[in-house]
Image (cartoon, rainbow, N blue to C red):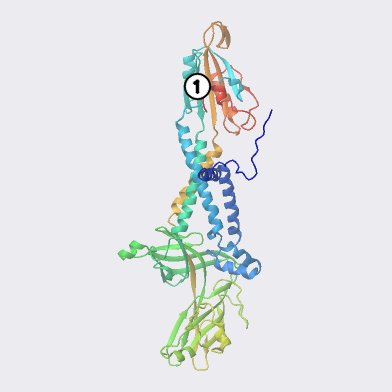
Amino acid sequence: MTQTLTTPPGAPGPPHPPRRWGRDLLALARNTWRGLTSMRTALILLFLLALAALPGAFLPQRGPSPQAVQDYFTAHPTLAPLLDRIGIFDLFATPWFSAVYLLLFISLVGCLVPRTWEQLKGLRARTVAVPRNLSRLPHHAAGTDPRAPDEVVAAARRRLRGWKLDVRSEDNGARTISAEKGALREVGNLVFHMSLLALLIGIAVGKLFGYEGNVIVMADGSEFCNSGILAYDTFRPGLRVDGTDLDPFCLDIDHFAAQYRPDGAADSYSADVRFSDADQIADGAPPTPGQIEVNEPLRFDGERVYLLGHGYAPQFTVTFPDGQQRTQAIQWEPVDQRTFLSQGATKFDRPGVTDDATRRRTQLAITGLFAPTSSGGGVVTSTYPALTNPEVAADVYRGDLGLDSGRGQSIFGIDQSMVDQGRLTRVARENLVPGRTITLDDGTKVRFDDVKQWVNLQVSHDPAQDAVLVAAIALLLGITLSLTIKRRRFWVRVTPAPPGSPSTTGGRTVFDGGGSSVELGGLARTDQAGYGEEFDRLRADLLPTAPAVRRDAPTRDDAPDPTSQRDNGGTR
């Protein structure tokens, strides 16, 4: 008879067991950590990092190529703002890229720490004991030897010199040798992953404590000194750099030379320089001569100075009605990189004028186009980038340049709003060759004197660049070891032959009741071919009369490892 107990209506039910929030949270954290530090997760994050970096390789970045980014916005006015919202033009500083980078870093640390410990223990551990049934191995051989077991073992040890060996004795009196070779494969794998981790750390240190800056310097002996961020035209500091403690050095640009092919393509750029590091500056020592070329930066004291480009700076002399002269050469911006047709603005204040209103009415600006090799004619255009027939299509403006308005303006142009308001008017337009002069209506003379050249330099400071280089070399070495070295094992079992058993002496089989029964076995820990030939050589030296027997080698995916605990009673 079965009795069913029911709870009366309205009565409280049985109490629920208390929730153990601490245990649940600990289990969640443990499972999350295990998933994050698994090799599968590390590979996925490495793939995501490579995938996320692809846009940075195909699209311009604001850091190294701000002008290319601006050109992309001009060419793609609809797509560029959408890409800019997700940080594509400053890809390596976006939060999502940094998140993938940080997760990969944590995953690698979590993978490598226990793996390194296991590898160290594995190097000190004994080799795997001989399996009971060597005939199950992919490579095996068996035969007899007239020598005593101790002599056979001694001969095998001499033949296996260079292998990691362990000699054991079994209960039935058999002597065994366990040999293993190729441990450097795992060491190379570990070195590869450790180097990858060191590479990530080095890149992170460079982003934190490094900086990059660009500066334009006239190639006429002008000097640039790394005294602070105000010395640069653009400056990109690391996250821990405020620009107040830069390594001091000075650089004089004495000469620039460019070689061009007949079609106008650049063949080579080079700049002759003199540089002084911090010690030379402190000691007052003379500067050291050097040369900078494209892809061949100047390196000293952890600094790298790259030559990124060059351009032209027309030099003008203005003679004012009172006879005073001012001469100035300012870089003009190339608008056509193929022919170096350039545009710019050279601006002058009238000397000796102290009244602000008068000064703003008498400021001058010479704007227009410059052609290093002019085509001639009324419209100035350039046909070749070299300086062979320079000419300037000059527009001279007089009035208020807006330099005191508090608004920033480009050095390559004038404030168009001043022209629109009538506060800046054009007073002359003429094509000028070197030595030619324009005379304005108030007697002011503007002469085109000559053309100078300027260079665009990039200064890069990365305190971890040497460590990154070492890590990259170690990474290549590690992956080379991992891919080229085979992990293999070789076993020998020597058993005293029973009385009356045959043995081979001098090619004849005799029944003398002595000698040894010898079994050989081999197993490659990887699927790389080539171990069969090595096993045959070992077999020929240890058992010259025994034929080699090979089974279809079971791979790690479709057959159990004959060296497992089930076969030899030990641990792997």
Residue under pointer 1: 177
Which x, y percent locates residue 232?
45, 69
Nearest the camera: 347 or 186? 186
Residue under the image location 35 percent in, 62 percent down: 278
Q: In this view, which residue lies farthest toward the bottom?
A: 442
Nearest the camera: 281 or 112? 112
The N terminus lies in which quarter of the figure?
top right
Number of numbered discs on residues: 1
Which x, y percent locates residue 151?
47, 15
Q: Is residue 297 above or below residue 475?
A: below
Q: In this view, which residue lies farthest toward the right?
A: 1
Nearest the camera: 305 or 79? 79
Which x, y percent locates residue 537?
56, 24
Which x, y percent locates residue 334?
56, 73
- Regarding residue 379, the answer to whether it shows in the image is yes
In the displayed structure image, the side of residue 373 where residue 300 appears, left or right: left
Query: Of helix, strand and loop, which one carries label 1?
Result: strand
Q: In this view, which residue lies farthest toward the left?
A: 283
Q: Is residue 17 above or below residue 263?
A: above
Q: Is residue 367 above or below residue 133?
A: below
Residue under the image location 57 percent in, 22 percent down: 567
What amino acid is at disc 1?
A: Ile
Nearest the camera: 35 or 309? 35
The image quarter containing residue 392 is: bottom right
In the displayed structure image, the side of residue 310 where residue 378 appears, left or right: right
- Regarding residue 459, the answer to whether it shows in the image is no
How many residues crowd around disc 1 within 10 Å: few (fewer than 14), some, or many (20 or more)?
A: many
